Image (cartoon, coloured by chain):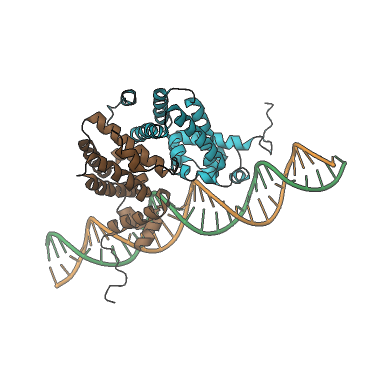
Chain colours: A cyan, B brown, C orange, D green
Amino acid sequence: MSTSPKPYHHGDLRAALLDAADSLLDAGGDGAVSLREAARIAGVSPTAAYRHFADKEALLAALAARHFAQFGAALGEAGLDAQGIAYVRFALARPGRFRLMFGPLLARAKAHPELQAASSAAFDALTRAAGGKEAAIRAWALVHGLSHLLLDGALSDEVSPEGLLTVPR
Amino acid sequence: MSTSPKPYHHGDLRAALLDAADSLLDAGGDGAVSLREAARIAGVSPTAAYRHFADKEALLAALAARHFAQFGAALGEAGLDAQGIAYVRFALARPGRFRLMFGPLLARAKAHPELQAASSAAFDALTRAAGGKEAAIRAWALVHGLSHLLLDGALSDEVSPEGLLTVPR
DNA sequence: TCGGCGATGTTGACATTGCTCACATGGACC
DNA sequence: GGTCCATGTGAGCAATGTCAACATCGCCGA
């Protein structure tokens, strides 16, 4: 009742757009995110988004950054094995987010400082958990590859992430 | 001179479209492939493509299948270490193809028998080269993850694939 | 040999998307 | 209380995927 019917100014459109994009991402994957649809969900005109993001890529970058922050925090304090399992779990539970975060966009991170910072922070957590640098990379690559292969259904279904990951002595 | 100026029927449009899509893929990556542009390159009207592919996804699937065949053949006879290095090299040399082949499309392979067959064939080659099944998966995941991380620029530039891959005793 | 039919291409159209430009609105600050 | 600037609106453009109706050709049987 009391909620004003349509305030011209939205309050926090930026966050609203990110939330909308997020739901699209989780629902339909990477390609299902559309600026216009996000605006629609946020109840705002298509062009309003451009007051907050330079273009679609910027929106996606901000979204990815947001998720990297969460991701890094979640991994943060766990041991190496636990991190690995959490990593794969995350990928399988949220394929859209995973692919956005580790997709082609990441290669263009230097154009998006937010993303750059958030992702390196997460990576540092990983590197710290593994001992040396080489070992870290190897462990990370293993887990990352496993995530991708599982996600893409390249592995027969009989494979369990835990099995593969807890053995690797 | 002698080439008829514009035969109504193209000859082998299907292959021509695949070639066109391929060049777009190599040039601009996954997202740069457009049905219309491919048709343009093939010198044909936009809708002609639909005589040969149900939709854009089908085109992409056929393309991926084609590359899987090549890929599998290339890996085919090499030893495990050599395979690993070739794998990573391929990813770095042809990011577009790699991402197409191992991207979200692969997860939808059951909708595209061609792709299904070609990819499993390639995977079998991998599995055969590594000894046991678990070892194969682990090796594959390592190499696959490394490819992705390098591609996405997630690894500091100082890392050399060969270094990571030839040591892992 | 020729006539028709199915495979292949073409035209035209529609909805959707990313993005730009010119304009409207209204809250924060003097 | 008045003004400025961040925020939002609307119309519009080019491009894309896709559909439906129509055109053209070449191969196959009468």
The image quadrant that residue B143 belongs to is top left
Residue A63: x %, y % from top left: 53, 37
Residue A165 image offset from top left, x and y in percent? 34, 26
Residue B130 image point, x, y percent: 22, 35
Q: Is any atom of residue B119 visible in this view?
A: no
- Position of residue B89 relative to residue A131, above or below, is below
- The residue that appears at 26% across and 47% down in the rendered structure is B71
Q: Nearer the viewer, residue A163 or B100?
A: A163
> Could you tell me which residue is drawn at 24 percent across and 45 percent down?
B75
Q: Position of residue B156 (x, y in %)?
A: 45, 41
Quadrant into which the N terminus of chain A falls: top right
User: B2 or B82: which is nearer to us?
Assistant: B82
C21 shown above or below A79: below
Question: Which image quarter is the C terminus of chain A in?
Answer: top left
Q: Is residue A39 left or right of residue B77?
A: right
Q: Could one spot residue A60 in this view of the protein? A: yes
Q: With B162 as the anchor, is B28 left or right in this view?
A: right
> Toward the viewer: A123 or A101?
A123
Residue situated in front as seen by the camera: A94 or A46? A94
Looking at the image, residue A134 sits to the left or right of residue B109; the answer is right
Name above or below for residue D30 compared with residue A56.
below
